[in-house]
Amino acid sequence: MGGLSSLLDGSQHVCSKLTKIFNSEDNSISRTTHIDEEGHAHYLTFSCYKGYKLFRYDTVCNLFIEALSNARSKYEFKLLAFVIMPTHVHMLVFPEYETTVKTIVYGIKKRFSHYALNFLESENPELYAKLHKKRGAETRRKFWQAGSGYDRNIFNPDAIRNAVTYIHNNPVRAGLVEDTVAWKMVKCQLLGIG
């Protein structure tokens, strides 16, 4: 595992590609779920099941970072920013080549959920007991809120900067810290875009 500092990419390839896309006259932001358009960054949010503070454990945070690192090794995408909050995660990603957002999300969430739930089962059995949903005769373990999360396509340089700033400042806005430097689960990088 490369840790927080090795997760972000400042590749010149991404910068030049984004600059070309963002020089268009259209400054709108498409708000929809998993629409893969070439040259679009994606602002993603995943929430914990029923809003439980499942990321309050360092082990769970580290498991997520490991899953994120593994997904970056397996799939072609750039990670521009992310923050792990107690009840959710924000990420700004830039898929490359034929990689879809759905593939990225699945690659991160599925593997991570299995290991995080195993940890929570041993660490906090009372909380773990609440992380189940019955569907017919079957009971399933749940780490994430149902659905694929929130996905916003971003193709404007100001919108990218705003998303990075929002992600970076999320712990301060939530009242968890007074300065983002104090929040250990935030990593952001603003690319030099046009």
Image: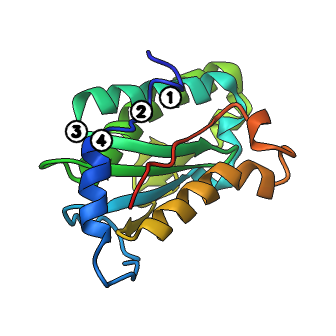
For marks 3 and 1, give the CA distance: 17 Å
Q: Earlier in the sequence, mark 3 or mark 1?
A: 1
Is residue 70 shown above or below 56? Answer: above
Q: Find residue 129 and report its horizontal and vertical position in percent.
A: 64, 37
Q: Earlier in the sequence, mark 2 or mark 4?
A: 4
Q: At x 43% / y 51%, what residue is drawn?
A: 192
Q: Is there any visible trace of residue 47 in the rendered image? A: yes
Reading the image, the residue beneath label 2 is 68
Q: Is there any visible trace of residue 143 in the rendered image? A: no
Which residue is most to the top?
Answer: 1
Amino acid type of disc 2? Answer: Leu
Reading the image, the residue beneath label 1 is 65
Front position in the image: 118 or 151: 151
Front position in the image: 2 or 138: 2
Q: Nearer the viewer, mark 1 or mark 4?
A: 4
Front position in the image: 137 or 102: 102
Asked if the residue at tag 4 contacts the one at tag 3, i.e. Cβ–Cβ closer than 8 Å, the answer is: no
Query: Badge 3 local density, few (<14 within 10 Å), some, or many (20+)?
Result: some
Secondary structure state at the residue bearing disc 4: helix
For marks 3 and 4, give the CA distance: 15 Å
Amino acid type of disc 1? Answer: Ile
For marks 1 and 2, give the CA distance: 5 Å
For marks 2 and 4, give the CA distance: 21 Å
For marks 2 and 3, give the CA distance: 12 Å
Kindly identify which numbered label has been placed on residue 12. 4
Kindly identify which numbered label has been placed on residue 10. none
Q: Earlier in the sequence, mark 3 or mark 4?
A: 4
Secondary structure state at the residue bearing disc 3: loop
Query: Badge 4 local density, few (<14 within 10 Å), some, or many (20+)?
Result: few
Asked if the residue at tag 2 contacts the one at tag 1, i.e. Cβ–Cβ closer than 8 Å, the answer is: yes
Residue 121: quarter of image: top right
